[in-house]
Image (cartoon, rainbow, N blue to C red):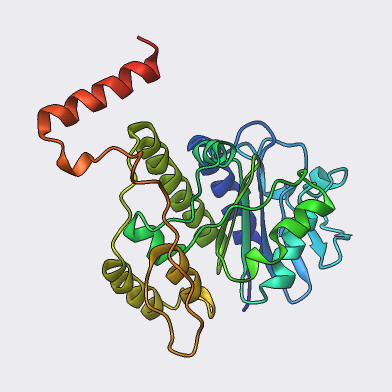
Amino acid sequence: MRVNEQELRQTFVKIGRLMYEKGFILASDGNISARLGPDRLLITPADLHKGMLGPEQMLIVDLEGNVVRSGYSRSANLKPTSELPMHLEAYRQRPDIQAVVHAHPPHAVALSIAGVPMARCLLPEVIVMLGIVPTTEYATPSSVENVRAIRELIRNHDGLVLQRHGSLTVGNSPLQAFIRLETLEQNARIGFMLAQLGVDNPLPPHEVEKLLTIRDQKGYSHATERLEFCQICGTRHAANEAHLPAIQPLDTATSPKTSSLNQTELRELVAQVVQKTLGN
């Protein structure tokens, strides 16, 4: 696929600004990369505010992580993001992808620290656009451990939560990888609200099946994901694949039975949660 380098640089500027404005990053957090060709990547620099980048500050690296001369004086003394090894690993494991976005979305990070999984079937758009969103084991950022933490998971997932660290999303363009970041954080935000309410109400398996059909039609599905949806969401799988038992996200004996609450009781419950959250 032919890539216009100048357009790609401008796209990085726009996405970096959006990531900052939406609260997905701050200071020098986050990084963006995309393929320029079969053996070249464009990537954001280290130690600069990603919401305030100029197009000439992006760097070109090869697939071994070596900086290629870019010809821009403003990038002469810059280094690639310290998360470059994680980006390179994503491209090694996923020859189909064209871009990688790493951010620090706060709700996703908070849920990972609290031990609340994002791998649940709650929202239709998440099932269609992202599929299952697993959380990695904790690994030191910018380390070899971090590369190992994503290696297996990124092969069959388009979005990951990096425990206590952030998110990693991939796509056929920087824009798609960013959109998947937005979807991931929206899922986390709603999951955070549900956790405050003490509610967990996943979609029933037959509704998830309908969404998986749409996902297949859009070409977003991965070869082995049906087994994972079977395990987590209780959906059907191919007859020649071993059955995995459905995982129950919460102990229903200790979860509130919100479906039996009337409107007055539900309002009172929400008011109590809000008061507790605000400390009043």
Horizontal and vertical percent for residue 178?
A: 52, 54
Residue at point 84% right, 54% down? 144
Residue at point 46% right, 49% down? 182
Residue at point 81% right, 68% down? 63
**Image quadrant where one finds the N terminus:** bottom right
Horizontal and vertical percent for residue 195?
A: 40, 37
Furthest toward the top, the residue is 280
Quadrant of the image occupied by residue 230: bottom left
Furthest toward the front, the residue is 253
Horizontal and vertical percent for residue 101?
A: 61, 54
Furthest toward the bottom, the residue is 240
Marker count (numbered): 0
Q: Depth check: 38 or 253 in front?
A: 253
**Image quadrant where one finds the C terminus:** top left
Above or below for 68 versus 237: above
Quadrant of the image occupied by residue 140: top right
